[in-house]
Image (cartoon, rainbow, N blue to C red):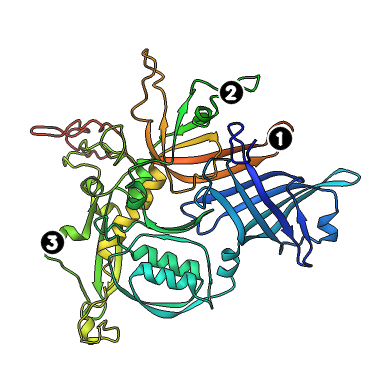
Amino acid sequence: MSRNELQYAGDFHIDELRLVTVKGNSFSLKDAYSSLEIYEDILSNSITGTLSFQDTNALVRNGPIIGQERLYLKIFTPQNSPNEKTIIDFTKNVLYVNKVLSVTDVNDGTQAVTVSFTTQDAYMNNRVRVSQSFKDEPSEIVKKILRDPQGLNSKKKLFFEKTSNLYKMVMPNIKPFHAINLIAQRSMSVKHQFAPSYLFYETCFGFHFRSLDNLFDRPTVTGVYREHTPGARTEDGDNDNKIAEMENIISYNINQSQDTLSNLMKGLYSSNIIIYDWQNKKRRTMDLEEELKFDYLKNFPKEKHTNTNGNFGSPNPLLSEALETDESKKMTEYPMSTQFVQSIDLDPTETFYTLQDEGGETIYDGNNIEKWLMKRRSRLAQIDAAIKVEVEVVGTTRVQAGDLISLEIPNKSSSSGGSYDETMSGRYLVKQLRHSFMKNDKDPKHTCYMLAIKDDVAQPFSKVGTGPGGTALTDAGPATDEQV
């Protein structure tokens, strides 16, 4: 049978799994490994992983394995047309073992060894510093930091979203990943209404510098997963339905709890910013005072969300628009709940950091903190406050963190079969991903464990208490004071 033909759901093929020690000795672990796990996260700058293998050559002692070894890996899900977007390949940009986690005696001649590994870029990030000035679009600055021969010197692919603003920035002797994270904070999207939700993270296929809106605004999903898909593999090995079996949800756990008090303190729902002129000792005033305030409900329609291009209705916020107090206000109409203060110079033409081009025109953006800080803080808080589903599915090497997937979860309370829970079903963003390759006695098995999130619902929550003549949800009557 062809190596590119899927034999069963969860099948995978290892082209290379090789450990090279500091002495230059090379050991193939294709037959000796017992498990391999790779971790990705859209909030992590680099991938990590663990490898367990049966050591019959006393590698830990004789190799020796000291946490400086190189790991060559090439692994993929069998398919008709494998390509660079479906194959996990670390044979050129190799992985590095950073720690021996455990060594356990199995018998007189065998030890079970587990090591952890990460990328070469993670090592370089802790070896070099960025200490120079840049003037360009943020996405271009990120490229320069990644490709700098004296810095990270990374050869990996970079998937980036073009930014709208121009900055003149000085990186004061800081680590490259830290520098890029600082740039991400101030970056705004060209395409998505100046969205300030940029992330910098790594997957098995390269680095990503893109906004949450860019991740959400995609017409198709990487995979569709359903609970209890009919046609599971039979005990006699009938593989006719192995493709359908790939769409099975093995198990899932839903967490849709909301901590609205915590969200309020994080600035998810509302905030304001005080901009103080340190030279003239006065607060900044703007023609539109609303520019210094943020309201989650008002801003929600301007953003892209998980179900923006989905099939389960229009996206709606994870918050009711019901009135909260006797003041007839919504929860998002209290900008003083979270407050930011930024000190700037309102008259830059008289100071040392005048930003001008050769013709004397000011072309570079200042801090402009009111354009990104409040929105970004809310957007990142929405990731933590999102509906979360921990899902286990049959593995495939083409899925990665940051992908969109579709989950179809049956409506348990419905008497009609085949109907889906509209609240829980729909498109999800893969926030965290763990590839698990297990070498079983019968068939090696690849499983993907994902933490998938959605930041919207198909049907809006009740607007109780709103509208003409509406009353607040809480009415305790007149206040009273009694001396005792």
Give how far apart the Cα atoms at labels 3 and 1 are: 64 Å
Determine whether the residue tagged by mark 1 lies in a helix, strand or loop: loop
In the image, 388 versus 231, the foreground residue is: 231
Q: Residue furthest left?
A: 468
Report the residue at 26% width, 48% height from top. Answer: 296
Q: What residue is pinned by disc 1?
A: 440
Q: What residue is pinned by disc 2?
A: 233
Rendered position, 14 above or below 256:
below
Q: Considering only order in the chain, which callout, 1 or 3, is on the residue closer to the N terminus?
A: 3
Report the residue at 54% width, 58% height from top. Answer: 46
Q: What residue is pinned by disc 3?
A: 288
Give how far apart the Cα atoms at labels 1 and 2 are: 17 Å
The x, y position of residue 417, in whole percent, is 39, 15
In the rendered image, the quadrant that contains the C terminus is top left
Between marks 1 and 2 in the image, the one whose residue lies nearer the viewer: 2
The x, y position of residue 215, in whole percent, is 37, 50
Question: What amino acid is found at the position of numbered circle 1 in the picture?
Answer: Asn
In the rendered image, the quadrant that contains the N terminus is top right
Residue 476 visible to the viewer: no
Report the residue at 54% width, 44% height from top. Answer: 397
The answer to whether residue 269 is left or right of residue 177 is: left
Report the residue at 75% width, 53% height from top. Answer: 28
The x, y position of residue 311, in whole percent, is 30, 33
Rendered position, 387 above or below 156:
above
Question: What amino acid is found at the position of numbered circle 3 in the picture?
Answer: Leu
Between marks 3 and 1 in the image, the one whose residue lies nearer the viewer: 1
